[in-house]
Image (cartoon, helix red, strand yellow):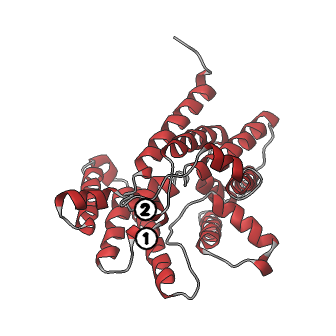
Amino acid sequence: MALGGSILLTYGAAALDLADPAASVYLATAWSPLSVIVGGLLFGYGMAMAGNCGFGALARLGGGDLRAFVIVLVMGLSAFAVMSGPFAALRLSLFPLGNVGESQGIAQTLSAMTGASPVAIGGLAGVGILLVSLANLEFLRQRRLIAAGAAVAVAIATGWVGTTYISTTGFAPASVISHTFAAPLGGTMLWLMTASGTSIGFGIGSVGGVLIGAFAGSLLRGHFRWEACEDPRELRRQIGGAVLMGVGAVLALGCSVGQGLSAFSVLAYSAPLAAAAIILGATVGLRQLVTGFQVG
């Protein structure tokens, strides 16, 4: 429901000229399919090892889980090290970016083939996915899941609306982006250390919003409690997983939220590729945790 709702709301906003999917980072930025696949595999495997993604770690940190704090720190550091730090040149040499073609989006390609507008195609895609999810009677009984899915869809779409507005009306250049939780973790850490030299962007606000929301929710529900890691093996696995997630998210141009929801909401070609790689990587990681690498 979150996926279908985010697509429908995003293209609905585009119909009202409140959002511009074609200007989003996922459609206007050059990318490498090989990089997305490798990054997705690394991210998925790391997610299984760490037991969380960036968003999940922030949510757990807001509830008092200090293990998640370690994941957030390590993931943010590793993402920045590969994105703009000492390993950035190695990343670009191993995974050179392709050229930005006429279309990086599914809706734009289908529009060129059929003559229908990208907005109409995106809206139909969103409605179709929503109908599939709502056809599940068991899901319809889960009011909390429905409310959560709707909230996620609104969050993704309003991210596009807000950054589109800033991009078109602001004095300084700004990227059209929505929620993702890998590089913004490192950006938040950098801002905390050098606030006088940096400004608060959408990513930092997104990280802060999740933390505050998770903290408030845990207090209201009486679930807040301090937790720490007591097993060195678990801590080692979580740190290794966080490193893989940070590196993988940069290579894949997004995490499970960034590619799995934000990129999907604008129907970017990279989204299904990254999502499939993340699922495969997570499946391999979970298999290793449960049964080991047994053959036969």
Q: Which mark is residue 27?
A: 2
State the image coordinates of residue 249 (x, y, percent, origin top left): 59, 50
* Residue at 43 percent of width and 76 percent of height: 161
| 228 and 233: which is toward the camera | 233
Does the rendering let one see residue 1?
no
- Mark 1, Cα crowd under 10 Å, few <14 / some 14-19 / many 20+, is some
Residue 277 location (% of width, % of height) = 49, 40
Rendered-image quadrant of the N terminus: bottom left
* Mark 1, residue position: 23
Q: What amino acid is labelled 2 in the image?
A: Leu
Residue at (56% x, 61% y) in the render: 180
Counting from the top left corner in percent of width and height, residue 78 is at 72, 51
Q: Residues within 10 Å of mark 2 (few under 14, many from 20)?
A: many
Where is residue 51, by image quadrant? top right
Q: Position of residue 248 (x, y in %)?
A: 61, 46
Q: Secondary structure at mark 1?
A: helix
Q: Say above or below: 265 vs 294.
A: below
Side of 213 where 165 appears, left or right: left
* 31 left or right, relative to 288: left
Does 167 sit above or below residue 77? below
Q: Are marks 2 and 1 in contact (CB under 8 Å)?
A: yes
Q: CA distance from mark 2 to mark 1?
A: 6 Å
Q: Is residue 69 visible?
A: yes
For image coordinates 39% across by 52% down, the residue present is 269
Q: How many marks?
A: 2
Q: Quadrant of residue 157?
A: bottom left
Residue furthest top in the image: 296
